Amino acid sequence: MNHLITRKNDVLDKQLHDDSGELPALIVSAGASARFAFEEFVYGKLRNRSTRKNYLHAVKRFLAFCELRQRSLVAITPRDVGEYLDQMPNSVATKKLHLAALRHFFDSLVNRHAVLLNPAASVRGARLQVIEGKTPEIGVAQARKLLRSIDASNLVGLRDRAILGILIYTAVRVGAVADLVAGDFYDVGTQHCLRFQEKGGKSREIPCRHDLQLFLSEYINSAGITDNKSPLFLTALRRTNTLSERAMTSGDIARMVKRRCRRIHLPARFSPHSFRVTTITDLLSQGVPLEDVQQLAGHADPRTTRLYDRRQRKVTRNIVERISV
């Protein structure tokens, strides 16, 4: 049974790869209203790039699943949605994301009269209660070791040190770092600041501490970046320690972090988001008020900030060693 599910998922993934730049076949065959609703949903309603990418993947994957079942768009039922979720080998959180995408997508189809009812509206997702985030925390000592390990005598080293400094000293998400342009680092008279474009269209200004300001200034001067509209962080040209004209993506930064961690034998599971956990936990451990940390993290709800707090929430080895079995 598991072999059949794996094979089916491989077929779905292949179909997604083959027609990723085209409208799904079920949408094309359903007529003009369905095509309009699909494009309105993807390109009109989903303004955040990350959300658009994830929701588009979920919708295309589900439609490929229905195509394998020889279902037309108007014949899709709640059973199809439920069985699609059941056969997914992914986590509960991923299944909930797919269900949310399908609900919003079919709402658009109903509004444009492409289908009569929303088959995903009545489908219940698996219960998921998040008490603590899953992102691994990189310790303060480990973060310091990582920063000290970078050779700042070359341009790539200066770039990587500046990126790590931003991740640590601002606690922003990696996507906001990748979107920075040179003009987002500026002097306001009394201090230097960074302006970030974040989730939900939020624009935030965060002051730079003195060492981060130094990291950025040294990198920008060495790279010769003078155009304020130029991407701040550029990809490296293989192993030449020179930079290209192409902006780094979130994936590029994530690979850089893992590569730097690997060089000093830190766990490979650390990611750019690990620094966000570290910074939030460190500030709360020092007694910084939750609302101030929430403001730095850019969270609308303090409960979200608490998910990043790793204080007193770990099962210690001392506890398990005391089990009398």
Image (cartoon, rainbow, N blue to C red):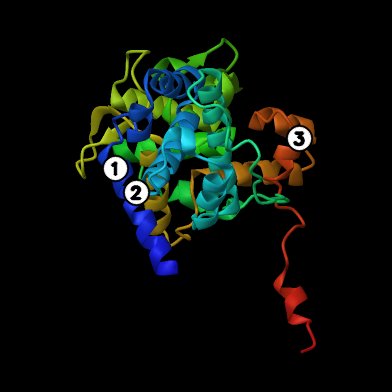
Q: Nearer the viewer, residue 114 or 243?
A: 114
Label 2 sits on residue: 13
Q: Position of residue 156 (x, y in %)?
A: 31, 38
Marks 3 and 2: which is nearer the front? 2
Q: Nearer the viewer, residue 193 or 204?
A: 204
32 relative position to 294: left or right: left
320 relative position to 206: left or right: right
Q: Nearer the viewer, residue 293 or 147?
A: 293
Are dots 2 and 1 in contact, CB under 8 Å? yes
Label 3 sits on residue: 302
Q: Is residue 60 above or below residue 147?
A: above
* Number of other residues with Cα within 10 Å of mark 3, as a class: few under 14, some 14 to 19, many 20 or more: some
**Residue under the image location 77 percent in, 57 percent down:** 312
Type of the residue with mark 3? Pro
What whole-number distance in Å separates the C-alpha atoms at marks 3 and 1? 39 Å
Q: Is residue 11 above or below residue 275?
A: below
Type of the residue with mark 2? Asp
Which SS class for mark 3?
A: helix
* Number of other residues with Cα within 10 Å of mark 1, as a class: few under 14, some 14 to 19, many 20 or more: few
Label 1 sits on residue: 17
Q: Is residue 321 above or below residue 134?
A: below
Which SS class for mark 2?
A: helix
Task: Give residue 61's quadrant in the image.
Answer: top left
